[in-house]
Image (spheres, grey):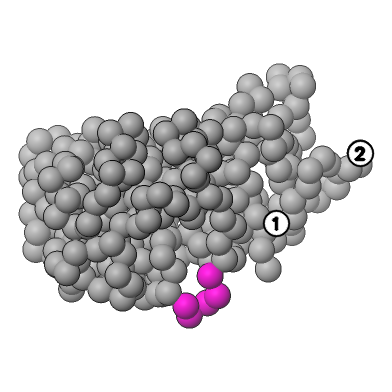
């Protein structure tokens, strides 16, 4: 199979909508990371996602919608869900709700809940509007590896396994969506930190929001993606530090969160996630930098964790801790 990258022209959007409607896969740009999309109403098409990614069937998929009407057709909603959608949709927030019978067990790993998101990326929204069905889409990468934030990343991981990639430029956020379990609207649970910070969520939910460090044993169905102990991982072994030692080995790679003099010339084995000392910048650059360093032939990648005072620390450090898990 030849994998082709398509520019987001009106003609190509119609062409790729037809690809999806006939049951094939298309990698799509979102504001978080690139996703691997299939028609969520087509069970056979959704199974192809698991095959292309080598993804275990116990890991459920997020369903992406263009409108609230589509979202209401997938799940049982409550008042908290409506409040969150009003504030954060379209955007990088995924809501877990009780599913309706029409949602395939392939998507939900056999669970009675479904994860739903309304993306804000204009190219993806145009495709959703054109295809007129919800699209199931996990990240467009081999399972367990770092998420792709460009079409080139997708092609490097899935070339020959999928027919098409829709070009949408570099992902603006650079890490996956926040996932919130609101099956019980009075006791929302943060399952995965992401593009909406816990600080932003608390402005809507107050002290009712519960945070959880979720790790799902292999073989057990997860309520949402990204909950395995090891995930988002480079091929190279990763070690995490709060602060680096004074002497840094020249043979290993070192990724600083920030350096006071961000303009200083660094050795080729060192780089900086956030030259401006902002976690938001580090999130945007995280997977691109990790991919580049992972291909450098180093025996180990050493990464500095984001200071806990930063609003994005939970999101980035969650990814780093899962990347470093043995």
Q: Residue at x 59, y 32 (%)?
A: 311
Q: Which residue occupies the foreground of this view, 7 or 200?
A: 200
Tag 1 residue: 238
Q: Secondary structure at mark 1?
A: strand
Q: Residue at x 34, y 39 (%)?
A: 84
Question: Whole-Å distance between the Cαs marked 2 and 1?
Answer: 19 Å
Residue 285 visible? The answer is no
Q: Is residue 177 above or below residue 256?
A: below
Q: Quadrant of residue 183?
A: bottom left
Q: Quadrant of residue 181?
A: bottom left
Quarter in which the C terminus is drawn:
bottom right
N-terminal label among 2 and 1: 1
Query: Residue 112 placed where, x, y %?
Result: 30, 70
Give the magenta part as a residue range. Answer: 216-220
Neighbourhood count class around disc 2 (C-alpha, 10 Å): few under 14, some 14–19, many 20 upward: few
For this orientation, the residue located farthest to the right is: 246
> Is residue 16 found left or right of 283 in the rendered image?
left
Neighbourhood count class around disc 1 (C-alpha, 10 Å): few under 14, some 14–19, many 20 upward: many
Quarter in which the N terminus is drawn:
bottom left
Q: Which residue occupies the foreground of this view, 68 or 264?
A: 68
Q: Residue at x 80, y 50 (%)?
A: 251
Q: Residue at x 52, y 77 (%)?
A: 218
Query: Was residue 102 drawn as part of the magenta stretch in this picture?
Result: no
Task: Please say if the residues under marks 2 and 1 sit with CB atoms less than 8 Å apart.
Answer: no
For this orientation, the residue located farthest to the bottom is: 219
Which of the labelled discs sits on residue 112, or is there none?
none
Q: Is residue 146 above or below residue 85?
A: below
Query: Residue 307 placed where, x, y %?
Result: 71, 36
Tag 2 residue: 246
Q: Secondary structure at mark 2?
A: loop
> Is residue 77 found left or right of 10 in the rendered image?
right
């Amino acid at each position: 199979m030849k994998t082709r990258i398509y520019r987001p022209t009106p003609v190509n959007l119609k062409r790729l909508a037809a690809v999806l409607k006939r049951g094939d896969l298309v990698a799509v740009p979102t504001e978080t990371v690139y996703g691997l999309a299939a028609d969520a109403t087509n069970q056979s098409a959704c199974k192809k996602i698991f095959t292309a990614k080598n993804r275990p069937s116990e890991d459920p998929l997020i369903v992406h919608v263009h409108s609230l009407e589509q979202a209401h057709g997938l799940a049982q909603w409550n008042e908290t869900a409506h409040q969150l959608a009003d504030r954060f949709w379209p955007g990088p927030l995924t809501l877990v709700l009780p599913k309706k019978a029409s949602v395939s067990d392939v998507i939900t790993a056999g669970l009675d809940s479904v994860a739903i998101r309304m993306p804000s990326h204009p190219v993806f929204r145009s495709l959703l509007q054109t295809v007129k069905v919800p699209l199931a889409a996990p990240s467009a990468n081999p399972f367990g590896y770092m998420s792709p934030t460009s079409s080139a990343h997708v092609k490097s991981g899935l070339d020959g396994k999928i027919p098409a990639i829709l070009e949408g430029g570099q992902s603006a956020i650079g890490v996956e969506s926040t996932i919130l379990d609101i099956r019980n609207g009075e006791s929302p649970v943060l399952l995965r930190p992401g593009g909406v910070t816990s600080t932003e969520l608390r402005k809507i939910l107050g002290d009712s929001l519960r945070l959880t460090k979720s790790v799902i044993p292999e073989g057990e169905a997860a309520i949402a993606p990204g909950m395995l102990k090891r995930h988002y991982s480079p091929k190279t072994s990763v070690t995490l530090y709060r602060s680096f030692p004074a002497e840094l080995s020249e043979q290993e790679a070192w990724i600083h969160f920030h350096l006071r003099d961000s303009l200083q010339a660094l050795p080729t084995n060192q780089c900086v996630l956030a030259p401006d000392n902002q976690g938001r910048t580090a999130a945007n650059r995280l997977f691109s930098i990790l991919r580049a360093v992972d291909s450098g032939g180093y025996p180990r990648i050493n990464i500095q964790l984001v200071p806990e005072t930063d609003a994005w620390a939970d999101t980035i450090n969650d990814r780093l801790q899962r990347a470093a898990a043995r």
